[in-house]
Image (spheres, rainbow, N blue to C red):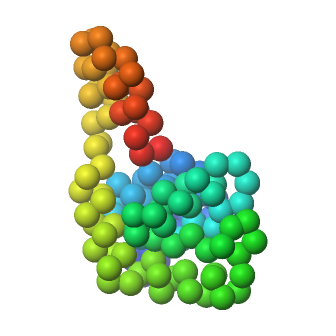
């Protein structure tokens, strides 16, 4: 992933790249195709932290609009807000919950962003 004018560029999308870009506060464009990618694209578009051009067959218009959507001032601001909410200590927090006997909460915490 390399920054390009403030945008996270990842030629191959999967959960780790979406999560890493979110934690970094980088707006994203996710062009979803197979498997869980439409879900991941929705996780980027729904909170306003990037763009998800029409899947599974994006149009020229939706691809052309994606950079403007992802880099709009509101999207950049929202991405920073969301990045500040992302926990970076999920593993430690989940281990503590497991030790305290809160297994369900630990599982939810580990899968909260990915």
> 54 left or right of 99?
right
* Of residues 80 and 54, the one drawn nearer to the viewer in this rendering: 54
Observer able to see residue 2 = no
Q: Position of residue 12 (x, y in %)?
A: 64, 59
Residue in the picture at 51% in, 73% down: 51
- Residue at (28%, 66%) from the top-left corner? 80
The residue shown at (63%, 54%) is 37
66 sits to left or right of 21: right
Residue 76: quadrant of the picture: bottom left
Quadrant position of residue 54? bottom right
Residue 23: image x %, image y %? 35, 55
Is residue 29 visible from the viewing direction of this image?
yes
Residue sitting nearer the eye, 89 or 39? 39
Q: Is residue 108 above or below residue 68?
A: above
Expressed as whole percent of the image width and height from the top left, the position of residue 63 reads: 63, 81
Q: Residue at x 31, y 69 (%)?
A: 78
Left or right placement of residue 61 versus residue 80 in this view? right
Image coordinates of residue 48 in percent, x first then y, are 40, 69
Q: Quadrant of residue 38?
A: bottom right
């Amino acid at each position: 992933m390399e920054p390009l004018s403030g945008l996270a560029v990842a030629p191959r999308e999967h959960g780790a790249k979406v999560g890493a870009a979110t934690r970094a506060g980088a707006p994203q464009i996710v062009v979803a195709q197979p498997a869980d990618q439409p879900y991941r694209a929705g996780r980027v578009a729904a909170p306003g932290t990037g763009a998800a051009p029409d899947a599974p067959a994006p149009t020229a218009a939706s691809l052309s609009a994606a950079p403007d959507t992802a880099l709009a001032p509101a999207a950049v601001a929202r991405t920073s807000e969301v990045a500040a909410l992302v926990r970076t200590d999920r593993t430690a927090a989940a281990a503590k919950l497991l030790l305290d006997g809160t297994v369900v909460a630990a599982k939810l915490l580990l899968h909260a962003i990915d």
